[in-house]
């Protein structure tokens, strides 16, 4: 079985959000970059667990990015995975990214493609669905549990107010979120081994972006906090009713 | 140019987020000086024509019960075939769980520009630019959609439902769906609670409540207000709350208003203010447009 895990580089969750070039570009000054948590904690770990259960399985990682994403890829390889593929392209257009991943997936004839639920920077949640459509594969989004028996996957996914359990045959695309796996910390053996694992760089296939970022904006300053003593619930009720108008 | 709105439903009822998408689509159609049309796959317990009160003139309806269960691939094909036949179009989804599964597939199939997480009507003065939240709600991005067919996934609670009078014309949509590649084995939903993804109002708590045994006051307040409950990340990680019913709002929904416990507000103190004293209760009204 061949598994392809999509990995993204994102700013750390505590990074200060600022923009440059007349608010058209995210400012990376002082930013610590991490593996997108949904990719690292859930997609990648689940793929590794599947490989641990079936040592003949192969796990490849894929990133669409320029050379500055290589340290992130090595961190991911330190957690697990047999090799990585980087498509040498800088893009924020979801269709463009999906085309690159789909091309690699098609050439590699992967049985399973894992993505994270979304990236924590652009919150698109689009790549998994687009890749599935480009490959004409079934797609199960927002999985909270993934089990495999032979070539049949049983996936629990989130629905409004509950869960749904689905079944689908491989090949399959799945987006993962909390519940699919537990975060792993890379050990020293993994860190040392990551240095020698193959990291192939491929050139992108030609495609035109369908969207473009015109500008970014920061939200207005938050309103101040109002403190209400605990022995004055009637004041809280009055504020909720007259000012916040929640009822 | 046409405006189509995908109508999402569950157990025969149109989801609130979809009513928002209908209202948004109707407003967009008015802005573009065209009409809004709905796309409904599956069956409702009420007359779909009644959805005309949300401003849509026509509903393309494939009334097969087999389409009540989501198969994103099948749904994407049906929707894409209809929209592509209409030429230049804007297709509106809710960015809810169904929209996240179907909208990207439709966009890829049509090679259409897609923006997910939209929070406002497009600016069509210079092209077609849609505002969305990014960096988990810490910023906004203005995205230009550069294709003849455009797909917008509207964040839940980002647009007010606007209902008036009127009936929509029902147009039968004849489809022959293939066998689904995804089979639904079972579904479980919690009853008696407002799903977080559908909530307009959320009551949230944090570790200041000391333990799950004290959560009753949060639930009681939520029940009185008709709100959903949520919790801070440490509380969720400590398993004080069931993960389905209580989750940090910024994971899923764009809520216009929230009420927080004082412990939550320690994590986001207002500039110049000291941390609240123990025993105080805080409330903070968030400005509309900020993803919580």
Image (cartoon, rainbow, N blue to C red):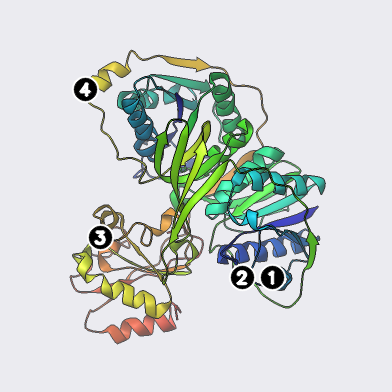
In the rendered view, would you say B69 is above or below A84? below
Select label 3 or label 1 by which is in front.
3
Marks 4 and 1: same chain? no
Q: Earlier in the sequence, mark 1 or mark 2?
A: 1
Which residue is painted at 79% across and 59% down in the image? B172
Q: Are marks 1 and 2 on the same chain?
A: yes
Label annotation for residue A86: none
The chain under label 4 reads A
Q: Which residue is mark 1?
A: B54
Q: Nearer the viewer, residue A166 or B206?
A: A166
Q: Are marks 3 and 1 on the same chain?
A: yes
Q: Are marks 2 and 4 on the same chain?
A: no
Q: Is residue A115 visible?
A: no
- Please tell me which of labels 3 and 2 falls first in the chain: 2
Q: CA distance from mark 1 to mark 2?
A: 8 Å
Task: Specify whether disc 4 shares its chain with disc 3.
Answer: no
Do callouts 1 and 2 mark residues in contact (Cβ within 8 Å)?
Answer: yes
Mark before the other along the chain sequence, 3 or 1: 1
- Residue A50 vs residue A201: left or right? left
> In the rendered image of this protein, does residue A59 appear above or below residue B81?
above
Mark 3, chain letter?
Answer: B
- Chain letter of disc 2 in the image: B
Mark 2 and mark 4: span between their CA atoms? 55 Å
- Residue A83: x and y in percent read 40, 18
Separation of marks 3 and 1 at Cα, in angstroms: 40 Å
Q: Residue at x 78, y 53 (%)?
A: B174
Which residue is the site of mark 3? B240
Residue B268, percent across and down? Answer: 32, 59
Q: Which residue is mark 4?
A: A188
């Amino acid at each position: 079985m061949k598994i392809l895990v999509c990995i993204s580089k994102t700013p750390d969750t505590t990074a200060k959000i600022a923009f440059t070039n007349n608010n058209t570009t995210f400012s990376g000054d002082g930013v610590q970059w991490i593996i997108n948590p949904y990719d690292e904690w859930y997609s990648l770990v689940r793929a590794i667990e599947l490989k641990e259960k079936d040592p003949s399985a192969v796990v490849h990682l894929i990133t669409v990015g320029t050379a500055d994403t290589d340290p992130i890829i090595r961190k991911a390889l330190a957690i697990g995975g047999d090799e990585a593929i980087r498509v040498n392209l800088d893009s924020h257009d979801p269709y463009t990214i999906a085309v690159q991943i789909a091309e690699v997936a098609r050439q590699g004839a992967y049985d399973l493609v894992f993505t994270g639920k979304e990236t924590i920077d652009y919150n698109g949640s689009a790549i998994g669905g687009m890749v599935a459509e480009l490959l004409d594969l079934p797609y199960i989004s927002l999985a909270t549990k993934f089990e495999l028996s032979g070539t049949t996957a049983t996936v629990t996914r989130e629905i409004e107010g509950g869960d749904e359990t689905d079944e689908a045959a491989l090949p399959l695309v799945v987006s993962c979120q909390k519940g699919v796996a537990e975060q792993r910390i890379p050990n020293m053996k993994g860190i040392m081994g990551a240095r020698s694992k193959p990291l192939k760089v491929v050139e992108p296939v030609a495609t035109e972006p369908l969207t473009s970022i015109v500008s970014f904006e920061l939200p207005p300053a938050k309103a101040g906090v109002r403190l209400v003593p605990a022995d004055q619930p009637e004041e809280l009720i009055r504020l909720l009713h007259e000012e916040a108008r929640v009822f | 140019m046409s405006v189509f709105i995908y109508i999402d439903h569950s157990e025969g009822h149109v989801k609130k987020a979809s009513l928002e998408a209908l209202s948004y689509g109707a407003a967009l159609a008015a802005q573009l000086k065209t009409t809004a049309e709905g796309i409904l796959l599956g069956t409702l317990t009420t007359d779909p024509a009644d959805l005309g009160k949300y401003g849509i003139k026509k509903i393309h309806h494939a009334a097969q019960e087999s389409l009540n269960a989501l198969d994103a691939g099948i749904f994407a094909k049906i929707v894409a075939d209809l929209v592509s036949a209409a030429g230049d179009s804007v297709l509106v989804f809710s960015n809810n769980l169904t929209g996240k599964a179907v909208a990207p597939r439709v966009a890829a199939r049509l090679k259409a520009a897609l923006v997910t997480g939209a929070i406002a009507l497009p600016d069509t003065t210079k092209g077609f630019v849609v505002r969305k939240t990014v960096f988990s709600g810490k910023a906004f991005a203005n995205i230009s959609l550069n294709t003849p067919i455009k797909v917008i996934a509207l964040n839940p609670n980002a647009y007010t439902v606007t209902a008036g009078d009127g009936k929509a014309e029902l147009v039968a949509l004849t489809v022959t769906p293939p066998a689904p590649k995804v089979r639904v084995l079972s579904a479980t939903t919690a009853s008696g609670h407002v799903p977080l993804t559908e909530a307009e109002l959320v009551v949230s708590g944090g570790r200041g409540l000391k333990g799950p045994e004290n959560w009753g006051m949060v639930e009681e307040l939520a029940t009185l207000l008709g709100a959903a409950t949520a919790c801070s990340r440490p509380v969720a990680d400590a398993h004080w709350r069931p993960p389905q019913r209580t989750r940090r709002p910024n994971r899923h929904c764009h809520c216009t208003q929230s009420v927080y416990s004082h412990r939550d507000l320690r994590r986001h103190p207002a500039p110049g203010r000291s941390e609240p004293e123990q025993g105080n209760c805080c409330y903070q009204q968030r400005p509309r447009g900020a993803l919580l």
